[in-house]
Amino acid sequence: MTSDSCLHSLFLILVRLNLSSNQLKSLPAEISGMKRLKHLDCNSNLLETIPPELAGMESLELLYLRRNKLRFLPEFPSCKLLKELHVGENQIEMLGAEHLKHLNSILVLDLRDNKLKSVPDEITLLQSLERLDLSNNDISSLPCSLGKLHLKFLALEGNPIRTIRREIINKGTQEVLKYLRSKIKDDGPNQSDSVIETAMTLPSESRVNVHAITTLKILDYSGKQTTLIPDDVFDAVKSNIITSINFSKNELCEIPKRIVELKEMVSDVNLSFNKLSFISLELCVLQKLTFLDLRNNFLSSLPEEMESLIRLQTINLSFNRFKILPEVLYHIPTLEAVLISNNQVGSVDPEKLKTMENLITLDLQNNDLLQIPPELGNCVNLRTLLLDGNPFRVPRAAILMKGTAAILEYLRDRIPT
C-alpha cells in the first residue's frame, strides 16, 4: 500500500484530530475529506478564518477554536450534528442570524472573551442550547427572547450589562431567564412560561412543578423555606429524565439522601441559600455533575471524596466560611471556574493553582488576602481573576482596574529572580 493510499485510508477512519497549540494560520481544505471526524481541536493557533470546506463536515460534533484570531463566527450549514462549539478568546465582534440558523443540535456555545456588543433575537433558534458562555465581552443588554431558552448555565460576568440589575445576575441563570421572560411583551400567555402544578398538596403546602420536570428536565423545589425535601418531590420524577436540581432558598442542613437516585442523569445542582455546614457523600456520587452552586451556606470545608466529580466545570462557594481554597479542588482537573468570593480566605497557593490547567475563572473578591504571591502571575490560563475587596496593598487598585491580563503581568514582573 502506498503512502498516499495509507493517508487516504486514515482520512476516512479518523474520528478525533488534535491540532492545538501550533502556529497554524489556516486549515487545509483537505480536512473536509475526513468524513468520520467527530472531534476537532484547533485551540491556541493563529487562525483568522475557517475554510468553507469545514462547514461541510457532516459528522462533526465537537469543535474547539479557542485562543485564535477569529473575527466572526463561522457558518456551519451542513454540521447538523454539532453539539459543542468553543470559540472563546478570539476577536469576534458580531453574532448574526446567519451564524446561528444551522446550529440545530448545539448544546454548548462558548463565546467568552470576545468583542461582542450584542446578542441577536435569533439566539432563540438554538432550541437545544444548554450552556451559553458570554463572559468578558462588551454586551450592555440582552434580548428578552433569551428567556425562552431552556438554559442550564448562562455566564455573563465581565460585561457592562445595564438592563439587568446586578443582584439578579448574581442569583444565577434561572433568575436571569425568569427576569427576561417577565419582560416579554405582547406575546400573550405562554405555556412554557407558566407553572403547571399537580393537585396533590405536600406537607409544606407547596406543589411539585410537573411542567419543569417533564419539559425542562428540572426538579425544582426552591424557595419553600423547608428543612426537608418531601419524598413526594422525588416520587414525582417517575421515569422522567432530570438534568437539573434546584433546592435553593430553603432551610436544608444536609443534602437530601434521595438525590443519589438521580446520579445517572443530573449535571446541574443548585443548593444555594440553605444552611449546609457539611457536604455529605450523596453529592459525591453525581459523576455527571458539571455545575454546582453552594453559595450562601455555612461551609468551611469540602470532602476529599468530591474528587470523584470528574466532569465538574463550575463550582460556586461564595458567601460561606472558607479560610483556604479547599484542597480537593486541586484534584478536579476539569474545573474551569471557582467562585469563592465573600469568605475568609487568607492565602492562595500559586503552585497548586498552576496545576489546574483548565481553570480560567477565579473569583477571590471580598476575602482576607493580606498579600498576593507574585507566582500567581504564572497562572497564564486565567482569563478572569477577581481580587477586589481584600486587605492587601499591592497590586494597587489602579492595576486591578486594568483587568486580569494586567494583574498577571504585574505579578510576573515581581517574581524574584
Image (tube, rainbow, N blue to C red):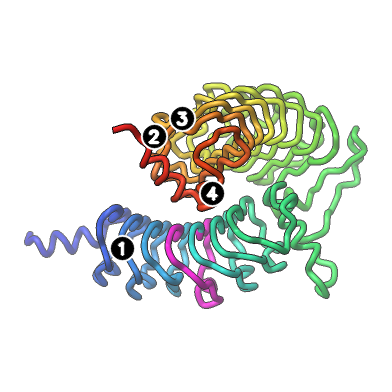
Q: Is mark 3 on a helix, strand or loop?
A: helix
Percent from the top left, x then y, of residue 413?
36, 42
The answer, for residue 190, to whether it is visible in the render is yes
Q: Is residue 166 above or below residue 181?
A: above
Residue under pointer 4: 398
Q: What residue type is labelled 2?
A: Glu
Q: What residue type is labelled 3?
A: Tyr
Residue under pointer 3: 330
Q: What element carries label 2?
A: helix
Given residues 197 and 374, the one toward you in this image is 374
Percent from the top left, x then y, of residue 158?
58, 55
Q: Quadrant of residue 20?
A: bottom left
Residue at x 42%, y 29% (from the top left corner):
352
Q: In this view, does 13 lie above or below 249?
A: below
Circle 1 Cα neighbour tier, 10 Å, few/some/many (<14 / 14–19 / ≥20): some
Residue under pointer 1: 46
Q: How far apart are marks 3 and 4 (CA)?
A: 30 Å
The answer, for residue 266, to whether it is visible in the render is no
Q: In which quarter of the image is residue 41?
A: bottom left
Range of magenta residues: 86-111
Q: Is mark 4 on a helix, strand or loop?
A: helix
Which residue is outermost to the bottom? 98
- Precedes in sequence: disc 1 or disc 3: 1
Q: How far apart are marks 1 and 4 (CA)?
A: 31 Å
Q: Distance between the residues labelled 1 and 2?
A: 28 Å
Residue under pointer 2: 375
Percent from the top left, x then y, of residue 246?
72, 41
